[in-house]
Image: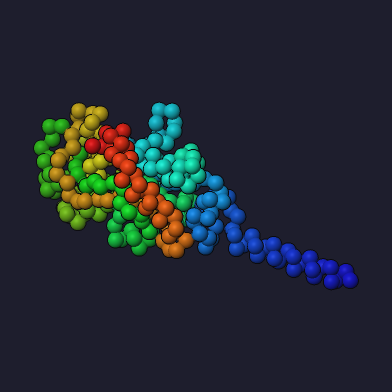
Amino acid sequence: MKKKLLLVLAIILCIIGAVFYIYDYSSDEATQKGGDLYKTVMKRGYLIVGVKTDSKPFGFIDTGGVNAGFDVDLAHRIAKELFHDPAKVKFVAVSDSERMYILNLNKVDMVIATMTITPARQNFADFSNAYYITGQSLLVRTGSTIRSLADLSDKNVGVIFGSTAEQTIKFLLPSAHVMGYKTYDEAYTALKSGKILGITSDDAILRNYSMKDGSVKLLPKKYSRDSYGVAFRRGSESSYMIDVVNNVISDMDNQGEFIKLRRKWQLD
Ligand code: GLU
């Protein structure tokens, strides 16, 4: 009788263990393994979104210590669609080089981080439709003799680690000395001190520096066409959520919400 009881107890413990293993209840996981992203998010009651904190005006920390910017507003708009409450979103800071890794570690539900949709990235993530178009350009010191990327041959130029511009300049100008920085502010400090002669990245992000500081200027030429998309883990788990986000993007387009956002963040 006692043996039977112990056996039943052991079976119950095994079942409980298996359930915990399948659902993996570790607290920082955005998605239960193999689960549908939309269902997981709705059950949790809020979104977890990876955003930049150094990329004004897309993702930055405002004077009140709160996440702000174009990408942050898009995240709030998606939360509004899902929960009828734009506040139902938790932000996780991501950098260019870490955003794909953080996404695939299940730390976030999606990444909205000035991320260009590229064929190489599509091997590791699924993307929404494009929500913003920009292009790679070059920020230099005012009065600099550098007038284009070609003038940077054998010169130091700054890029952000993991950005599309890092790849593009190595391809377009292999003779440039490319120096990588983790954040835009670090690259900007290096430009101001003369350590590098230019920073190459998205026009939409670099423009923020030339707008607030007359000692640097943005050259008008664009070297690429970059479409920003919301990134998701690859596979069917994300497909319904991608549909939801694509609907939000097309509604925002049709209802003039993106125009208002571009105006709000001085992007037009
Ligand atoms: N859009 C570019 C990229 O996805 C660069 C912008 C950024 O620094 O995030 O690599």
Q: Is 202 on the left-hand or right-hand side of 79?
A: left
Would residue 194 be seen by someone viewing this image from the given angle?
A: yes
Q: Quadrant of the C terminus?
A: top left
Q: Is 97 on the left-hand or right-hand side of 173?
A: right
Residue closest to the far front: 255
Image point 17% across, 49% down: which residue? 223
Q: Position of residue 152 (x, y in %)?
A: 14, 46
Image point 33% across, 49% down: which residue? 250
Image point 42% across, 53% down: which residue? 244
235 relative to 62, above or below: below
Would residue 93 be seen by someone viewing this image from the given angle?
A: no
| Along the line of sight, the residue nearer the viewer: 96 or 75 | 75
Q: Position of residue 69 (x, y in %)?
A: 36, 37
Image point 37% across, 53% down: which residue? 246
Q: How is the image coloured?
A: rainbow
Q: Position of residue 262 (x, y in %)?
A: 28, 38
| Along the line of sight, the residue nearer the viewer: 40 or 165 | 40
Q: Position of residue 64 (x, y in %)?
A: 43, 28
Q: Quadrant of the N terminus?
A: bottom right
